[in-house]
Image (cartoon, rainbow, N blue to C red):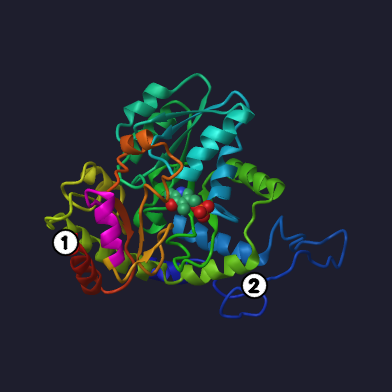
Amino acid sequence: MKINTKVLHGYEITDKTTGSSSVPIYQASTFHQHDLDSHSGPIYSRFSNPSRSGLCEAICAIEEAQYAEIFASGMAAISASLLQFKQGDHIVACRNIYGGTFQLMTEMLPAYGIEVSFVDATDPHNYLAAIKENTKAFYVETPSNPTLQITDLQGVISIAKKHNVLTICDNTFMTPLLSNVIALGVDISINSATKFINGHSDVVLGTLATNSASLAAKIHKIAVVLGGIAAPFDCWLTMRGLKSMAMRVKQASDNARQIAEFLACHPKVKQVFYPGLAGHAGHKIHMAQSKNGGMIISFDLGSYQNVTKFLQALKIPLVAVSLGGIESIISYPAKMSHACVSPKERLEQGVTEGLLRYSVGCEDAEDLIEDLKAALTVI
Ligand SMILES: *Cc1c(COP(=O)(O)O)cnc(C)c1O
């Protein structure tokens, strides 16, 4: 089954009992038990809910995975994946990591005796060099936020397998449609479905997928006991959003390529980061593990003064945190996603005062480029 068909028919899109054209919002906390001895349906919505189960099936289809779990946010999915570890365990993670995950790893996990080392993920050997006797997992994100550095997934996975270490991948930027990380061999794939999977900037939700029955059981127990599960309405909205995901991803990544090419040639743009450009570091590795360069571009305008003038003049994108909406969203990492990082660490991560991150939406590329062109004239 090809991808446009799969996002619509790779799972049960109708309600199993009535045949309704969407899996309904089962807005219930508990379920009547006709027979105490032989009850087989859902029991209580923290354990399972038919709206959430429907979305689980959809996520399994697009991830090509056997098991999925749905959480109240991307961070809840990430937390669940890391709370399977225990006191004395060690994790190796990429240095340029999502801010919330960085806080979890540096401010929360140490209190539970779980230790994290951060490495430059552009060379898989840095993961190898960081392995200790108690290393239990490699945590990766590629391309990284916001400078879109590339990790060689196959390189990291083969080191992990050799050393009996789990791999966990936050695949929010590429999505399972552009990079099937489960097929590449990661043990756990995580997505903030808040972004491209739901795609309409109206839900916060997280997904986790795996092919391992024992990992799935562990994660399910954590979801049920810690309780960070997603609400039925949010699951319904996400299933609705997912149905147009293949079309959105195609249009947005097509737009992004054209915009990246435009920015790369513009004299007022100091630097462009887009893994689909041949000059981008890691371009070849990225293209071997992904279908295209994705929907996200970062570019440097040289100074904060240029950034503020440019944003005032820009008409189409939302100026906001987050990404992955059907509409374009532009962010200023130094004051948004990386505000809690120290200025020194920010610069080391390439988050300069002129850097902007553009999450390209599904508008017409011509309009987006005209808008950028006009706003660049004011700096
Ligand atoms: C947004 C984001 C998250 C966190 O997801 P929430 O749904 O906001 O909890 C994690 N990782 C990446 C790469 C993200 O972009």
**Which segment is the magenta one?**
298-312
Q: Are marks 2 and 1 in contact (CB under 8 Å)?
A: no
Out of 324 and 239, give the one closest to the viewer.
324
Image-based side of 31 in relation to 305, left or right: right
Ligand 1 neighbours mark 1 (CB distance < 8 Å): no
Out of 76 and 338, give the one closest to the viewer.
338
Residue at numbered disc 1: 262
Q: Where's residue 20, x and y in %?
A: 60, 80
Mark sitting earlier along the chain (2/1): 2
Q: Quadrant of the N terminus?
A: bottom left
Ligand 1 neighbours mark 2 (CB distance < 8 Å): no
Q: Amino acid at mark 2?
A: Ile
Out of 319 and 272, give the one closest to the viewer.
319
| Image quadrant assignment for residue 372 | bottom left
Q: Where's residue 161, x and y in %?
A: 43, 31
Task: Tell me if I can see residue 294 in this picture.
Answer: no
Q: Describe the element under mark 2 as helix, strand or loop.
A: loop
Out of 139 and 344, give the one closest to the viewer.
344
Q: Describe the element under mark 1 as helix, strand or loop.
A: helix
Q: Amino acid at mark 1?
A: Phe
Is 299 contained in the magenta span?
A: yes
Instruction: Please give the name of the residue rendered at 30% of the width and 47% of the height, measured from the top-left corner.
Output: 289
Instruction: Please give the name of the residue rendered at 12% of the width and 57% of the height, measured from the top-left corner.
Output: 265
